[in-house]
Amino acid sequence: ALCFQAFLQMCNLPVRVVCRANAEYMSPSGKLPFIHVGNQVVSELGPIVQFVKAKGHSLSDGLDEVQKAEMKAYMELVNNMLLTAELYLQWCDDVTVEEITHPRYGSPYPWPLNRILSYQKQWEIRRKMKAIGWAGKSLEQVLEDVDQCCQALSQRLGTQPYFFNKHPTELDALVFGHLFTILTTQLTSDELCERVKNYSNLIAFCRRIEQQYFEGHDKDSCSSATSRSAKRSLLR
Amino acid sequence: DVPILISEDAVISQPAKILNFLRKQKYNADYELSARQGADTLAYIALLEEKLLPALLHTFWVEAENYCSVTKPWFASRIPFPLSLYLPGRMSREALNRILLTRGGPPLYSLTEVEAQIYRDAKECLNLLSKRLGTSQFFFGNTPSTLDAFVFGFLAPLYKVCFPRVHLQEHLKQLPNLCRFCDDILSFYFRLGVSGHSPAGQDSVDANLQKLTQLVNKESNLIEKMDDNLRKSPQHPPRKLTTLKLAVGGEASSPPSRLSP
């Protein structure tokens, strides 16, 4: 969720973040977040990047074909590993589900709708996990996968400021969004957070983007954006 | 569960565990890679699984003509009866399930739309792989690595199996460096007879493919014979039709109809 905000701010486009309980239903693909520009509604990172590009803003024009291929491959890695691990933790780890996810997801609705909707979402996510072979994984294995993914990202980033040297691209926005959310969201245990913290260049990368693109605005909107995005990411 | 590696007493399933086992036995194709190349490997494997795999699953297991004429008989011939009646169907249902759960959902509401999207993604993935490979022999220079094995594993069946519905295969054939990549690996690592070592598995796969090809050839011969019979049969009056055309469209008649007997 935060990755979209980061991406739009990297493109120097003004953005206002609004929270709604029926956000999933308003989105054209059922996935959050989405952007509402004039009379158009676009959701998911791929279509949003295309939409912004069609309007004349792009972060990846300076890349050659091989670099674009690499960027797309790394974005899939993040989606494949980090996003799936986040979903697993929110919806398949029983402790987290009971203590954090169910209450947060159902909070805008009265009883019994809150329980029904969150069980429905849980069932949906578990079916998907089963289809891709993640249902049989233990929490330890999922954390190993996250570690492997962070190691790959850390090695790719090296000592550069951004993944493609001097200028940020969609990949930087995506990685920032996921890592920042993992680092700042309260969960039942800190293991996930600790794994990411092992990679100092990734932490420095997150701080750099936060300072450059988020602390430029008022401090109020920054701190509320963090807490709102933490809440929004669990509502995914 | 396939594939399975059987080594002395150990039986290991799932690709990730097999790779780990081989690494512990000191077999590592990525020994010479830098850390960054190792990271690239993971990223490209993720790209293959997200963008190419759904279309491959569809081509082999969901596309009705392909499944019924190639995949199902092929797999059923290697599975003992009575599982051969049940397992291919189950694998087909699981493939469709996986495609719909991971790529289905709004704004794609019908299977046709999902199919169109996954083939678009697969073609884009093939283009990206081709650009990344460029003119090198393998993805990381002159020696093969795990990434080469993964890419080969995804591309070679698509490249070599003869399907009735082939549009993804045709797209692959338009990328000559990927075809050359598959051919190179096939000739280096899957060569039969020359070194005296021919893997038994490869032999039986070839034998089955041969049988299948013979069956298909027999059927197509039969169809040709039927066509011939129909054409020679006296109930078919093609000449009358052409004379009618000449009568109707005098000066506008096209050269072919004038020339026909």
Image (tube, helix red, strand yellow):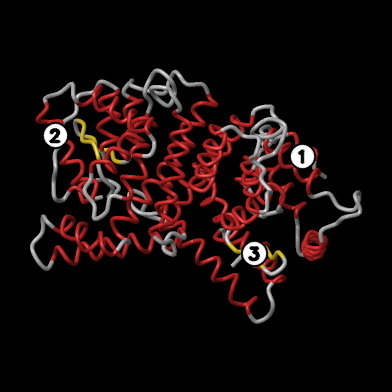
Residue drawn at x 83%, y 45% as measured from the top left: B261
Q: Quadrant of residue A8?
A: top left
- Residue name at image x 9 percent, y 66 percent: A111
| Mark 2 → mark 3, Cα distance in angstroms | 51 Å
Residue B164 in view, yes or no: yes
> x, y (%) of residue A57?
33, 21
Secondary structure, mark 3, is strand
* Residue at x 82%, y 61% (from the top left corner): B203
Depicted A94 relative to depicted B159: above or below: below
- Secondary structure at badge 1 equals helix
Q: Nearer the viewer, residue B68 or A198?
A: A198
For label 1, count other residues whose C-alpha is less than 10 Å away and answer few (under 14), some (14-19) or many (20+): some
Do badges 1 and 2 share one subunit? no
Depth check, mark 1 against mark 2: the one in front is 2
In which chain is the residue bearing label 2? A
* Marks 1 and 2, how far apart at CA: 56 Å
In the rendered structure, which amino acid carries the disc numbered 3?
Ile
Mark 3: few/some/many CA within 10 Å (<14, 14-19, 20+): few
User: Which chain does the residue under circle 3 lie in?
Assistant: B
Question: Judging from the image, what secondary structure is the residue with disc 2 in?
Answer: helix
Mark 1 sits on what residue? Answer: B184
| Residue ID at (18%, 21%) | A216
Are discs 2 and 3 less than 8 Å apart at CB?
Answer: no
Identify residue for label 3: B4
Q: Is residue B46 above or below residue B252?
A: below
Residue B111 found in image quarter: bottom left
The residue at which mark 2 appears reads as A223
